[in-house]
Image (spheres, rainbow, N blue to C red):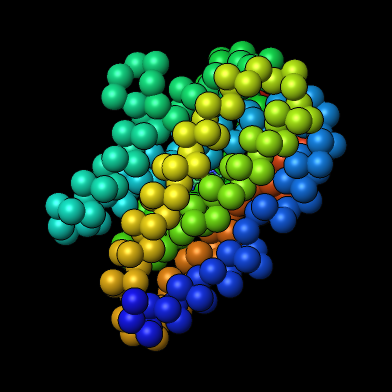
Amino acid sequence: MTRHGDELTERLRAVSAGRYHDRHPFNVRMHAGELTREELRRWIANRFHYQRHIPVKDALILAKFDDPAPRRGWLRRIRDHDGEREGEGGIERWLRLGEAAGLKREQLLDSSRVLPGVRLAVDGYVNFCRLRPVLDAVAASLTELSAPDLMRTRIAAFERHYPWIDAEGLAYFRTRVDQGARDGQEALALVLEWARTPEEQDRAVAALAFKCDVLWSLLDAVERGNAVGPLSGGAA
Ligand code: PQQ
């Protein structure tokens, strides 16, 4: 790798090391087995809001590519989440995780449990990818370089501390270990290719920091729960 590539990779890794949500108190409690059933269900229902918007933001990024090769790779991400047909893909696997945890899929699909702060965090990420140049939007996805380790920790924690969730419900996380690693490496190669000037490199680092903040804010809202008052229609 070129020297500029090494330096930028190092800067990006430093951002993740300091700000990635694996260190968020809610995740720390999840991994220690300290979450109640209700807290876990709240997390699953709210994280579904994030999951279902990932292919939307990926479609916005797709439209920014000029070349077929990155478009092909990015299209695969949308397929990973949406599946090739009904009943397949990451979104379906997340719905099954919800069911394994005792939630009805309608409770996830109707967004009735989505907290205001989660809505804003997800909107923030989608709009960032909608409005920013392709370099920034792709760099924001680089949290995925850290996600596989977190998935492994999470799978072990669920198996150990939350056996009431059927092991089959964990298929989402198992699939994401490899998908996340591959997606992260592909996105990193693009960012290293594109971010040549100091200004571009600063933008890539800032985009990753922003994305870490999105994930952190989402967990802040989940941790706080419904203390701000009932959600619209009292559906919570
Ligand atoms: N991040 C992206 C992205 O930004 O394109 C896509 C995903 C993540 C996923 O599909 C995930 O499942 C996912 N999961 C976690 C997690 O559960 O902690 C984190 C992240 C991430 O780091 O952005 C993603």
Q: Position of residue 181 (x, y in %)?
A: 44, 50
Image point 76% across, 26% down: which residue? 162
69 is higher (above) or lower (below) than 3: above
Identify which residue, 6 or 12, lies in the foreground.
6
Q: How many marks?
A: 0
| Point 36% across, 34% down: residue | 80
- Position of the C terminus, as image quadrant, is top right
Residue 1: percent from left, percent from top: 34, 76
Query: Which residue shows up at 55% across the image and 55% down it?
Result: 146
> In the rendered view, would you say 120 is above or below 138?
above
Residue 224, horizontal then vertical, whole percent: 79, 43
Res 86 quadrant in image:
top left
Residue 185 in sight in this render: yes
Residue 127 showing in the rendered view: no
Vertical order, 9 against 227 (above or below): below
**Up/down of 107 relative to 18, above or below:** above
Compared across the picture, whether 122 is left or right of 39 comes to left
Query: Horizontal placement of 111 versus 188: left or right?
Result: right
Which is nearer the eye, 88 or 120?
A: 88
Residue 229 in which image quadrant: top right
Residue 190 rendering spot, x and y as whole percentages: 31, 64
Q: Residue at x 26, y 48 (%)?
A: 73
